[in-house]
Amino acid sequence: MSIDVNNESGTEVDEQAILDIARYALARMRIHPLSELSVIVVDADAMEQLHIQWMDLPGPTDVMSFPMDELRPPSKDDDEPPQGLLGDIVLCPEVAERQGKEAPTQHSMDEELHLLTVHGVLHLLGYDHEEADEKAEMFGLQAAIVDGWRAEKGMTGPSPAPTVS
């Protein structure tokens, strides 16, 4: 799996953990091991510009996903996963820090970035949360991936509750 993490935010983030959880999520979703992903960490001003340009919404947001080849997880366990460019995930640590503090189960900026990375991966794979049933599926899968990764890393304590809308 080729995953690039580029921190342009000026904020110190755990780039290795972002890389690790993205790799874990893609493996769990059975994405081809030669697929490519880019994760960009930006400041609030850059995120706000992207949010306005692509969503026509004001203010910075937490995560945005820009799919390339529209890869999807294989439908059956024995299907060969397709290879390609997944696309870009853009994260904003300033928004992540605020959301972590405001969450019902308060958590760190890095923990929120882990959750947002998985959220972004799922968006790249075609998951959405516009409808209630889609939201339940996506957020359930998101929680399972974050919990599985945390267990594999030996992290204790409750996983962060989804704060992404």
Image (spheres, rainbow, N blue to C red):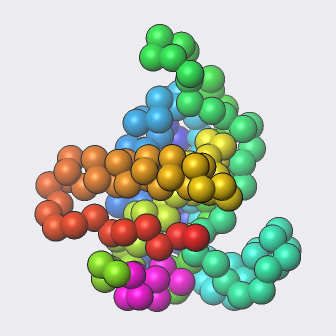
Image check: 165 left or right of 25? right
Q: Residue at x 17, y 60 (%)?
A: 155
Instruction: Check residue 115 for magenta coloring.
Output: no
Image check: 20 left or right of 154? right
State whether residue 15 appears in this view. Answer: no
Examine the image and state in which quarter residue 112 appears: bottom left
- Which of these two is toward me, 89 or 141? 141
Above or below: residue 35 compared with residue 120 = above
Q: Residue at x 77, y 86 (%)?
A: 58
Instruction: Check residue 101 for magenta coloring.
Output: yes
Image check: 144 left or right of 42? left
- Which of these two is toward me, 76 or 120? 76
Q: Residue at x 52, y 31 (%)?
A: 31
Above or below: residue 150 compared with residue 6 = above
Q: Which residues are magenta?
A: 95-103
Screen quadrant of the C terminus: bottom right
Predominant SS along the magenta part: helix
Q: Position of residue 40 (x, y in %)?
A: 60, 65
Q: Position of residue 151 (x, y in %)?
A: 20, 51
- Which of these two is toward me, 101 or 82? 101
Q: Position of residue 21 (x, y in %)?
A: 38, 53
Image check: 61 left or right of 10? right
Q: Residue at x 35, y 60 (%)?
A: 17
Q: Position of residue 141 (x, y in %)?
A: 44, 47
Outermost residue toward the front?
A: 132
State whether residue 120 appears in this view. Answer: yes
